[in-house]
Image: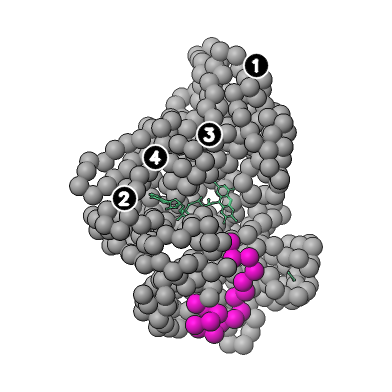
Amino acid sequence: MKPPPFEYHAPRDLGQALSTLAEVRGKVLAGGQSLIPMLNMRLAAPEHLVDINRVPELAVMEAAPDGVRIGAAVRHAEVERAGVHPLLVRALKLVAHPVIRNRGTVVGSLAHADPAAELPAVLAVLGGSVRLARAGAPERDVGAAEFFVGPMESAVQEGELAVSAYFPALGPRTGGAFEEVTRRHGDYALAGVCAVVTLGEDGAIEAARLACIGVGPVPVVVDVTGSPDDAARIVSERTEPDGDVHASAAYRRHLVGVLAERALRNATREAQARGA
Amino acid sequence: MEHEITLVVNGTARRVTVPARRLLSDCLRHDLGLTGTHVGCEHGVCGCCTVLLDGRPVRSCLTFAVSVDGAELTTVEGLSSGGRLSPVQRAFAECHGLQCGFCTPGFLCTVTALLEENPAPTEEEVLEGISGNLCRCTGYQNIVKAVHRAAELLAEEA
Ligand SMILES: Cc1cc2nc3c(=O)[nH]c(=O)nc-3n(C[C@H](O)[C@H](O)[C@H](O)COP(=O)(O)OP(=O)(O)OC[C@H]3O[C@@H](n4cnc5c(N)ncnc54)[C@H](O)[C@@H]3O)c2cc1C
Ligand code: FES
Ligand code: FES
């Protein structure tokens, strides 16, 4: 189908973008890879679209030793190509297909807040944050734990723009992994687990965190530092998957346990390789 | 409201007036008469509307024409030059990489960009590269062969 009519705004700088959003209260158009399908299927009919693709301040990516800040107009493919954050890049390769990633943005994936999307899990497991701006107010940083509010619902308020996201780097003796099961390559996951493991000087697990997707309204973060060997059971107990045409709730619950074990094992192996 | 935009399509600047909601796929097909770009699902899944935007493959059904005002586009009509099919097009013909041809424009644009970025892809890289394009006829085997053959042809002609 065709999208419903809307009024189009293409601000040329950040100030203009914020004042337009404050005035028209429209929807932000970033890569359009989730929004345009929703418009084409007439699942949304915003009166105004504010296109942020011509706002130069948002097209920047800053990589520092302690983490990477990614502007709202930076596309999945650009982050992948820059290779700035190994765990983020690994997760990006699981997002849709290369052609979709040429348009889709990292911040758009976070703002869209699909419960089966990969990037929210990466932000959640790392304890990253999203920076929000609105006209005439100071910017605010919202941590991942508060940013994901519910299925397709983030902390971005009407008239607000997510300007960037910050993904902390993995520290020394720390490894990451992302494991998921999809019906077809590039589909949203039936379930998935992002793991980050830090080893002590002696090689024992010092910290182990998991973020699970497709098994709750938002990424479910589980700390299994105390009992990594029991991760599958803990995760199955802590998640509340729904059943749908793709998989039953019981299958998802089983799957997330298996994936948790696998992700932990792979993250531990990577931590060892990184100089434990 | 209507918007006047300029698109550089296959090397020619085209001015066109479109409503904001005009999808790039419809702009190419209906406003510019370039019906080589096909439309299947209109939600990003089938890949047959794929065109090159500033050299990179994108879904024209998930892009608004107004959003890409000023950009350079290559559609399937722009792949051949001087009446001669491009190496990717010749490889698809030679390897029987198409039957009904509905998916073909999207595959050709996707593969053209894939081989530009990675002139000698492995089997796995080819599968990953075309994973976003659906074909209901060929069973994909000959498309995969065509991608490898196109890589050979491009190497020979380089
Ligand atoms: C075939 C297909 C398969 C896909 N598979 C996957 C998958 O496996 N995993 C996955 O995670 N995603 C998948 N996606 C979705 C894709 O990753 C989207 O690109 C992404 O979810 C949204 O990013 P975008 O920049 O395209 O945002 P848009 O589509 O432009 O926007 C999405 C939503 O976020 C809001 N928004 C965007 N940016 C901002 C901002 N800066 N501030 C405030 N609000 C904002 C918009 O208003 C809109 O509501 C798939 C898409 C397609 C078409
Ligand atoms: S028509 Fe665009 S992906 Fe199917
Ligand atoms: S040749 Fe018919 S769909 Fe691919």
- Identify which residue is drawn at 50% across, 61% down: A39
Q: Nearer the viewer, residue A235 or A248?
A: A248
Quadrant containing the C terminus of chain B is bottom right
Q: In the picture provided, is B56 more to the left or to the right than A144? A: right
Query: Residue B62 has which mark?
Result: none
Q: Can you identify the residue that label 2 sits on?
A: A159
Q: Can you identify the residue that label 1 sits on?
A: A229
Q: In the picture provided, is A65 more to the left or to the right than B90? A: left
Name the secondary structure under disc 2.
loop
Bounds of the magenta segment: B27-43
Name the secondary structure under disc 1.
helix
Quadrant containing the N terminus of chain B is bottom left
**Kind of residue indicated by mark 3:** Pro
Q: Nearer the viewer, mark 3 or mark 4?
A: 4
Percent of width and height locating residue B107:
65, 67
| First in residue order: circle 2 vs circle 3 | 2
Q: Can you identify the residue that label 4 sits on?
A: A155
Residues marked 1 and 4, same chain: yes
- Identify which residue is drawn at 45% across, 36% down: A149
The subunit letter for the residue under badge 2 reads: A
Separation of residues labelled 2 and 3 (CA atoms): 25 Å
**Relative to A236, is A59 above or below?**
below
Q: Nearer the viewer, residue A159 or A273?
A: A159
The answer to which quarter of the image holds residue A128 is: top left
The subunit letter for the residue under badge 1 reads: A
Q: Are marks 2 and 1 in contact (CB under 8 Å)?
A: no
Separation of residues labelled 3 and 4 (CA atoms): 14 Å
**Kind of residue indicated by mark 4:** Ala
Q: Nearer the viewer, mark 2 or mark 3?
A: 2
